[in-house]
């Protein structure tokens, strides 16, 4: 570091030298080795321990970031070897981006019946402290799915038709599933292995208010094949219902390739208190609070949603890091033949 | 078709064993039947490739699922990389003393593994599977060659095959060669991790989740980074450097072949 005695006072010069000495100390390669060892220990500890241990890795990453920053400033090797400098700067960018991603990410789960619009409501959500929820702007409609099963009821391709309105108000359609998410406003929606049957009802309240149409999501199928029942409450009432789907068909035959489909014939068993009734599509259940009409059987699909604005930047940093690392090694190895 | 697959595999393994035994014997006895060894390896690789191709054709997917498939395809890819190094870098040829026994262990393991087919998950139907696997195989292959050269340094220090190993380049030159291969491996490990992260993002909605395989792959990356920095921080003796390269390989080997078959959730959501 070059300092001009003429422009700075003696105390300031001394302070600057002390600071420079600290930066050089912080740039030590021995500290780098300690950071690697600490990070390794933190990773193994986090792996073997349940619970949140993110902070444990944040500490060595922070020290490593400072160490790397100080090394870039003070180590002359980085000025002589541009590829090495680029690699380390890309690595630093990766750490910063990963931290920014953790502060602003969103991970969630949702379920949509066929024909239902996603309006921003999540069944489960986990976010970074700085995430600003804008999910309501990521609306889309689940237009139904098809899933093929191989012998032994082993899930193969999932295809889920979705549609949405773009910024110009034009309807867009896509088929998502497996390796193809729906990306809306930066939110990435993925089909999950969770899906099942959704009986659709219309509830006509006795007080004359407007009828309400909706569905219940029975437990995931086929994973809960023998537990296709659900307890739920009629909207706007305290009436608790127990509902079970009954059918005799083998929908997914383990002996052959099959498709997820609705049963051809089924009944819905509804129990309210001591009353038990079997409903076919179109049947009505009269209660003192109103009339419940079982309309039809449909399906629901479970989605996971992920948001991380850093993804494209992480990709750029990774490409830059690997390309510059390869360039650096090439420069070093090309100077001498391998078969010397 | 399955019989032909297994017959070709057996033929390949016999040719590899013959090539390896000849290579080890000739190094110990200070003979140089290198063309014969390379020819045996190439014929073995061709038979093995035919076996893998027949299986791919029969099952409709590549050798990526079961332990049998992963061992078989890795024996093939590791030997391809070693054969390339054997052909292009003569100093690597005596490393067969170390490389071939490692491959013999994998071959023996392969022979006691069931060749039954596994389920090919829908998330594996992506080009990123091939990119990820290719980089991973080159990474492990480069590290194996490095281990072979590093092993020569350790064997020389242990006084084994002294007459033959005495004619090899000095330890520091061998160490330099071993480090070139391990640095090549490091580049491909980075590529493997990046390709895997892209695949994971599309397939499972997250690019990194610290599942067992990701954790141990990162631990391997850290160990490699530690080794490369240690080498420029302190002046390592070649035998210490060689020992560290061995440790990196052990960790990488356990990550590749141990974790996916020990953990019940190597890649969460993979199936």
Image (cartoon, rainbow, N blue to C red):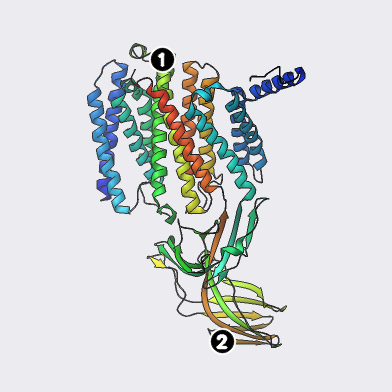
Direction from residue A310 to residue B17 in the image, left or right: left
- Please give the chain letter of the residue carrying mark 2: A
Direction from residue B127 to residue B216 in the image, left or right: right
- Camera-nearest residue between B98 and A180: A180
Q: Identify the residue at horizontal 49%, vertical 36% (top origin).
A: A321
Residue B126 image point, x, y percent: 40, 52
Which residue sits furthest front?
A6
Q: Identify the residue at horizontal 72%, vertical 19% (top origin).
A: A13
- Camera-nearest residue between B171 and B157: B171
Q: Which residue is mark 2?
A: A283
* Residue A220 in the image: above or below residue B98: below
Q: Identify the residue at horizontal 24%, vertical 30% (top origin).
A: B40
Residue B132 image point, x, y percent: 42, 43
Quadrant for residue A286, please give it: bottom right
- Camera-nearest residue between B135 and A100: A100
Residue B10 image point, x, y percent: 28, 39
Quadrant for residue A16, please give it: top right
Q: Which residue is mark 1?
A: B156
């Amino acid at each position: 570091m070059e300092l001009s005695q003429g422009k700075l006072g003696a105390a300031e010069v001394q302070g600057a030298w002390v600071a420079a000495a600290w930066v050089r100390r912080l740039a030590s390669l021995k500290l780098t080795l300690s950071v690697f060892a600490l990070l390794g220990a933190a990773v193994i500890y986090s792996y073997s321990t349940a619970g949140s241990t993110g902070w444990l890795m944040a500490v060595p990453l922070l020290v490593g970031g400072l160490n790397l920053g100080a090394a870039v400033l003070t180590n002359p090797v980085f000025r002589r070897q541009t590829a090495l400098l680029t690699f380390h700067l890309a690595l630093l960018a990766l750490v910063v981006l990963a931290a920014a991603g953790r502060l602003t990410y969103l991970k969630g789960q949702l379920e949509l019946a066929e024909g239902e619009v996603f309006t921003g409501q999540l069944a489960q959500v986990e976010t970074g402290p700085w995430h600003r929820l804008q999910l309501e702007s990521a609306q889309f409609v689940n237009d139904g799915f098809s899933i093929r099963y191989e012998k032994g009821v082993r899930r193969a391709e999932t295809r889920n038709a979705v549609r949405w309105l773009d910024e110009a108000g034009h309807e867009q359609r896509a088929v998502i599933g497996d390796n193809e998410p729906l990306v809306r406003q930066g939110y990435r929606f993925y089909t999950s292995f969770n899906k099942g049957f959704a009986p659709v009802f219309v509830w006509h309240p006795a007080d004359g208010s407007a009828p309400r149409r909706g569905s219940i999501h029975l437990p995931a199928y086929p994973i809960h094949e023998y537990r296709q029942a659900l307890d739920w409450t009629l909207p706007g009432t305290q009436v608790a219902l127990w509902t079970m789907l009954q059918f005799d068909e083998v929908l997914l035959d383990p002996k052959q390739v099959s498709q997820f489909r609705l049963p051809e014939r089924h009944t819905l068993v509804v129990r309210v208190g001591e009353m038990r009734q079997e409903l076919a599509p179109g049947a009505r259940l009269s209660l003192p609070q109103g009339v419940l009409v079982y309309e039809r059987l449909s399906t629901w699909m479970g989605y996971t949603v992920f948001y991380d604005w850093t993804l494209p930047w992480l990709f750029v940093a990774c490409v830059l890091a690997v390309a510059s690392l390869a360039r650096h090694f090439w420069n070093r190895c090309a100077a001498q033949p391998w078969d010397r | 078709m399955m019989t032909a697959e297994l017959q070709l595999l057996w033929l390949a393994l016999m040719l590899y064993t013959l090539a390896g035994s000849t290579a080890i014997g000739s190094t110990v006895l200070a003979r140089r039947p290198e063309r014969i060894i390379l020819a045996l390896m190439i014929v073995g690789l061709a038979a093995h490739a035919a076996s893998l191709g027949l299986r791919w054709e029969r099952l409709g997917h590549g050798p990526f699922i079961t332990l049998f498939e992963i061992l078989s395809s890795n024996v093939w890819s590791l030997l391809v990389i070693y054969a390339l190094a054997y052909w292009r870098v003569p100093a690597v040829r005596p490393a067969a003393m170390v490389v071939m026994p490692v491959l013999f262990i994998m071959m023996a393991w392969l022979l006691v593994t069931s060749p039954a087919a596994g389920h090919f998950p829908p998330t594996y139907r992506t080009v990123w599977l091939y990119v990820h696997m290719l980089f991973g195989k080159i990474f492990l292959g480069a590290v194996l060659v490095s281990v072979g050269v590093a092993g020569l340094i350790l064997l020389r220090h242990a006084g084994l095959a002294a007459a033959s190993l005495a004619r090899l380049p000095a330890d520091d030159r061998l160490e330099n060669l071993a480090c070139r291969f391990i640095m090549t491996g490091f580049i491909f490990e980075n590529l493997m991790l990046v390709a895997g992260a892209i695949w994971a993002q599309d397939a499972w909605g997250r690019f990194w989740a610290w599942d067992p395989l990701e954790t141990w792959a990162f631990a391997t990356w850290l160990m490699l980074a530690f080794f490369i920095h240690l080498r420029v921080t302190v002046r390592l003796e070649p035998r210490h450097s060689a020992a560290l390269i061995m440790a990196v390989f052990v960790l990488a080997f356990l990550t590749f072949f141990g974790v996916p078959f020990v953990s019940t959730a190597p890649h969460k959501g993979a199936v």
